């Protein structure tokens, strides 16, 4: 049975993934944009601005701004809901599916690298920091 990665390993995987994304050619996504993108691509269902805002616990204008950017990059597109014309559905794109595939590969590489690094024998004391 495989051991679960430690918190330090997970943070290392996240760091390596973000650094790789930032170093790539082209635009990179903010944390909010990435959160919206991943929610749309990893959770089934018809995603709406209202639903995403409720799910991510952020305002509808924040979701709209994130979707504006995802639309500019062709990672997602908006479409009027034919059943309720007041509602906007978020659709996946081929370019978004390719980005998700690349992201999985990058994270897989980072996870493999993290497994090769031996766990620290002593951990520094952790300090919990809250951000306002």
Image: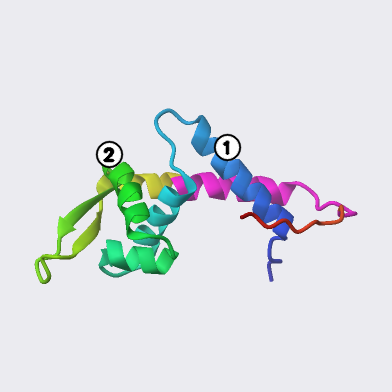
Residue in the image at 12% along x and 70% along y = 84
Q: Nearer the viewer, mark 1 or mark 2?
A: 2
Residue 116: image location, x then y, percent: 73, 47
Q: Residue at x 73, y 54 (%)?
A: 8
Mark 1 burial class by Cα count in 10 Å: few <14, some 14-19, many 20+: few
75 or 109: nearer the eye? 75
Q: Can residue 71 be seen in this view?
A: yes
Q: Is mark 2 on a helix, strand or loop?
A: helix
Q: In which quarter of the image is the N terminus?
A: bottom right
Indicate left or right for 116 with 43 as reference.
Answer: right
Q: Which of 121 and 118 is in front in this view?
A: 121
Magenta stretch, residue numbers: 103-123
Q: Which residue position holds label 1?
A: 19
- In the rendered image, which quarter contains the C terminus? bottom right
Magenta-colored stretch includes residue 52: no
| Residue that badge 2 annotates | 72
Res 97 visible: no
Question: Quadrant of residue 128 in the image?
Answer: bottom right
């Amino acid at each position: 049975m495989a051991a679960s990665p430690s918190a330090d390993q997970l943070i290392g995987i996240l760091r390596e993934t973000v650094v790789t994304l930032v170093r790539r050619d082209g635009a990179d996504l903010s944390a909010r944009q990435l959160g919206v993108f991943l929610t749309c691509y990893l959770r089934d269902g018809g995603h709406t601005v209202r639903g995403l805002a409720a799910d991510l616990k952020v305002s509808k204008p924040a979701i709209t701004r994130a979707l504006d950017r995802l639309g500019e990059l062709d990672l997602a597109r908006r479409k009027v809901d034919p059943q309720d014309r007041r509602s906007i559905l978020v659709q996946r794109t081929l370019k978004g599916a390719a980005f998700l595939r690349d992201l999985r590969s990058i994270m897989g590489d980072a996870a493999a690298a993290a497994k090769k690094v031996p766990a620290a024998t002593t951990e520094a004391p952790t300090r919990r920091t809250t951000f306002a």
